[in-house]
Amino acid sequence: MPEIHLGVHTIKSHGVTVARMHVHDWLILALLVVLDVILNLIEPFHRYVGEGMMTDLRYPLKDNSTVPFWAVPIIGILLPFAVILIYYFIRRDVFDLHQATLGLLFSILITAVITDAIKDGVGRPRPDFFWRCFPDGKVVFEQVTRNVMCTGDKSVIKQGHKSFPSGHTSWSFAGLGFLAWYLSGKIRAFDHGGHVAKLCIVFLPILAASLVGVSRVDDYRHHWQDVFAGGLIGMTVASFCYLQFFPLPYDIDGWGPHAYFQMLADSRNDIQSATTNTNTLNVQQSELGSVYMRPQHIVELSGVNTADSSPMLDALESGRRF
């Protein structure tokens, strides 16, 4: 259906009402934050690393990353939110702002919890694990199991056991993947108009997320399988979270959130209910008006001679006045 404007729904006018409808969702978001913090504090599984396995883990340990850790929230959260905020100022629809923000945060946090839980459970060494384990280059192994006995910094070694999957990649695909879905709905990328330029806009965030993943391989922080798995997790979660709040982009109502159309449906039902009640009241009043007759009419219909019924008329008239 085409866009319907029933006035503006701003943060000031409808913000509190919309937020109260999803208060439990915001509580779950807070729970996800706490859970992810805990997953980052616990020690990951230390996978066995023998002498023969060190051959593929001797890549250089770079001091800096192409995409530093602090840049990931900017790419995956702030950039999509900026686009959502710009659309709010254009349309002035708090339903879209709230649902899109909620979907974006759920996409990021669910992805973060899944990624960090798998990291801790798998404990795969990073490609630069050798230099994290032995910063001086002197290899030390246990005599019996021939497992590594790392001599490096514990925090650096801890991060060295978190290669699979790539957190940078999963976060980027979660945020930018959600943005790709969001843009495809807003610009009606699948309206059968044949405008390929719209697809270029949709694919741009996905390309940016892919480049973040490529940088993790180039920096020897991850294996290619880590990046592939991270991108798959992020994009899958982003898709589920977007479709929880918005219709499919090729749907006729794909430009707006489910909550907006539910509000329109409720408004129509309220109007129809009020109209029905008004019509019923008018009919009842009309029926009462048709039944009401002066007393002399009732007497005439009863066959009583009005000339001889003055006492009866006076009594009826006095009763009516009373």
Image (cartoon, rainbow, N blue to C red):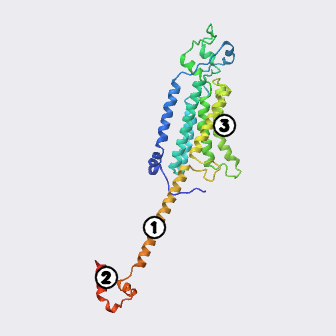
Residue placed under numbered mark 2 in the picture:
316
Report helix, strand or loop for mark 3.
helix
Mark nearest the camera among 1 and 2 is 2
Q: Which residue is mark 1?
A: 278
Residue 89 in the image, given as x and y percentages of width and height: 52, 49
Q: CA distance from mark 1 to mark 2?
A: 33 Å
Nearer the N terminus, badge 3 or badge 1?
Answer: 3
Q: Amino acid at mark 2?
A: Leu
Residue 283 visible in the displayed image: yes
* Closest to the observer, 169 or 211: 169
Q: Quadrant of the C terminus?
A: bottom left
Location of residue 141 in the rendering, given as x and y in whole percent from the top left corner? 62, 9
Which residue is at a point 60% across and 30% down the rendered structure image?
168
Number of marks in the rendered image: 3
Residue type, mark 3 in image: Leu
Q: Amino acid at mark 1?
A: Thr
Q: Counting other residues with Cα less than 10 Å from the Cα at mark 1, is it few (<14), some (14-19), or many (20 or more)?
A: few
Depth check: give the residue in front, 306 or 228.
306
Q: Residue at x 51, y 59 (%)?
A: 269
Say whether marks 1 and 2 touch (CB < 8 Å): no
Tell me the residue that label 3 is attached to.
Answer: 207
Badge nearest the viewer, 3 or 2? 2
Separation of disc 3 and disc 1 at Cα? Answer: 57 Å
